[in-house]
Image (spheres, grey):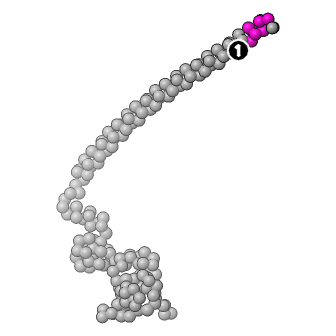
Amino acid sequence: MAIQRIACLSCGSDRFTRDEQNHLVCDYCGSVFRTRDNVCPACQAVNPSDSLHCNQCGERLKRRCTVCGHDNPGNAEYCANCDNALDILEFITRRYAEQGVQDRAVLVESKQKDTAYVEEQSARLRQIDAERIAALRQQKAEQMRQERMVLMAVAGAALLVLIVCGLILVLTSLSPAG
């Protein structure tokens, strides 16, 4: 096994000293690294002692217990201090099951109420959409009516101009040249 040179993950320095607990301390930035229990099992990087995840690859180094706050190894499923499940969903499910809250009838009733509420809101939104569409159709019809009126006014004015021009031409051609 080859000896690997290590570097501080915080500053990149390769100079370390050991403290009284035998942890590595970066001489440059003072970051503390545990040499045994905070080495990443995935990439073997040495991490600061308070890291919950590897600073290099993101692998979980510790799992904090939601009940007692104890830091457990990253691959632990149960707390070494209080023996509670470290998986938060399992913990919540077990806690509710112990309290008797996870009664199927209560959950079914709650789901039915939620479904009825969602359907009611959906119907309300469909009604609002139908009213908006009707208003938009009415606005479109009014716009088309106004456009037709403007078009008729422009056509009438053009026709009037043509008639006036025609009369002028007729009158000028009928008048004696003089």
**Residue 126 is covered by the magenta coloring:** no
Crowding at label 1, few (<14), some or many (≥20) Cα neighbours within 10 Å?
few
Q: Which residues are magenta?
A: 169-177
Q: Is residue 79 above or below residue 139?
A: below
Residue that protrudes farthest toward the front in the picture: 178
Estimate the x, y position of residue 23 in percent, counting from the top left. 34, 90
Q: Is residue 4 above or below residue 62?
A: below
Instruction: Look at 41% across and 85% down and name the residue there.
Output: 46
Estimate the x, y position of residue 36 in percent, counting from the top left. 36, 88
**Residue 172 is covered by the magenta coloring:** yes
Estimate the x, y position of residue 160 in percent, counting from the top left. 64, 14
Q: Is residue 25 visible?
A: yes
Instruction: Look at 55% across and 20% down and name the residue there.
Output: 149
Task: Identify the element where label 1 is drawn.
Answer: helix
Q: Main secondary structure of the magenta part?
A: helix
Q: Is residue 1 visible?
A: no
Q: As drawn, is 52 to the left or to the right of 12?
A: left
Q: Is residue 74 above or below residue 172?
A: below
Q: As drawn, is 25 to the left or to the right of 95?
A: right
- The image quarter in which residue 92 lies: bottom left
Residue that protrudes farthest toward the right in the picture: 177
Q: As drawn, is 18 to the left or to the right of 57?
A: left
Instruction: Look at 43% across and 75% down and name the residue there.
Output: 58
Q: Amino acid at mark 1?
A: Cys
Q: Is residue 39 above or below residue 133?
A: below
Instruction: Look at 41% across and 76% down and name the residue there.
Output: 59
Estimate the x, y position of residue 130 in percent, counting from the top left. 41, 32
Q: As drawn, is 71 to the left or to the right of 128?
A: left
Q: Which residue is mark 1?
A: 165
- The image quarter in which residue 176 lies: top right
